Image (cartoon, rainbow, N blue to C red):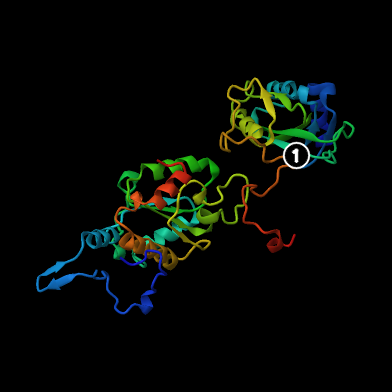
Amino acid sequence: MSDPYQPFQPLSKAKTLSPVEMPPGYGGEGFFATTLGEAVGLARKGSMWPMPYATSCCGIEFMGTAGASYDIGRFGMERFAYSPRQADLLMVMGTIAKKLGPALREIYEQMAEPRWVLAVGACASSGGIFDTYSVLQGIDRIIPVDVYVPGCPPRPEQILDGILRVHHLAKHESLRRRDSAEYKALQAHYGIE
Amino acid sequence: MSVDEAFFAELRRVLGDRILSYEADDVPTIVVEASDLYDAVAALRDDETLAFRFLTTLFGMHYPTNAEPANAEPATGERLGVQVLLQNMSAGRRLRLTCTLPVERPELRSLTPLFPSANWMERETYDFFGIRFLGHPNLKRILNIETMTVFPMRKDFPLEDQSRDDKDDRMFGR
């Protein structure tokens, strides 16, 4: 299995443009055999259900991403889960006030494993321009974040790039990353059981 | 007698010596003692002629050196303040009442018995300035998170979030 944290290969440099990259395996006419991990990783990547948590202008960019021009459905993500119980990916887009922090954390805790978090925009990543008493200085103060998308707000292409990086993690990480010592330590750091 | 003078005479009739100073601004402003604010607002509301029956807004202020406002009392150092904006809808009149409070004991009688709309405004004033409104039915923070222990609109509260550890002063020209 390749290193999940290796630099993402830009599409322009990829050898072939294919919606699904074939995993290594043994195939012939009418059949293909690969490991369960590769197959499940492919499935997770190809049908990730995002939960949009949009609080400000980054949410507008997300709406553009979901619309026809950028069409998030090309990546198997057109089905939004508005319940954290059914979501795989929490997309936090916008300023999170400190008063909103406990609500966001509860949503994250309600998500079932495997779960990923995408912080879209400067505010979700670091507090952005709102360096003040009322704004959470980055959602990674309360929940772990997998991928950060910079920008104020980021263009839809940047959001798609962040999503593809989450897909890269989903495809290449261990199927049970929640059992890894590193992941457990991270959850313990945030006090999440 | 100009319009302003006639209006001031009406205020004199209702409030008497409670008026510490009067300023005929675009919104006429009177300064009263903090202990008189409740009675003054009640008198202005119940008077048949003035009839200030609408509370437009109520908010807090903080004067760290008491350079402002131009109030009647001598400069006593750091003061907190409360302003109340009243309106008479039928006559199209506005009136601003100002009072200041000592920062050590910022207590004021709540206006909620007179105007139920003062409820949330007083909570906000308490939330940001720490001014306690005695007799308020539910005086707790309204906008900030409940666990906050400071009053962020006071001038001595630093603007920037103090939990940031990534800000290098050299990058910000200071």
The residue lying furthest to the right in this view is B74
Percent position (x, y) of residue B3?
A: 80, 36
Q: Quadrant of the N terminus of chain B?
A: top right
Q: Quadrant of residue A34?
A: bottom left
Residue A121 located left or right of residue B9: left
Residue B126 located left or right of residue A82: right
- Residue A118 higher or lower than A96, as above or below: below
Q: Quadrant of residue B146?
A: top right
Specify the subunit that label 1 lies on.
B
Nearest the eye: A154 or B94? A154
User: Where does label 1 land, which residue?
Assistant: B27
Percent position (x, y) of residue B77?
A: 85, 35
- Look at 33% across and 67% down and name the residue there: A2
- Look at 65% across and 27% down and name the residue there: B53
Q: Quadrant of the C terminus of chain B?
A: bottom right
Residue B90 located left or right of residue A167: right
The residue lying furthest to the left in this view is A30
Nearest the eye: A160 or A164? A164
Residue A52 located left or right of residue B159: left
- Look at 38% across and 73% down and name the residue there: A9
SS for tag 1?
loop
Percent position (x, y) of residue B134?
A: 67, 21
Q: Amino acid at mark 1?
A: Val
Percent position (x, y) of residue A68?
A: 34, 65
Residue B89 shows in this picture:
no
Residue B108 shows in this picture:
yes
- Residue A126 higher or lower than B79, as above or below: below
Decide: few, some or many residues near mark 1? Use Cα within 10 Å; few <14, some 14-19, many ≥20: few
Nearest the eye: A182 or B122? A182
**How many callouts does the rendering have?**
1
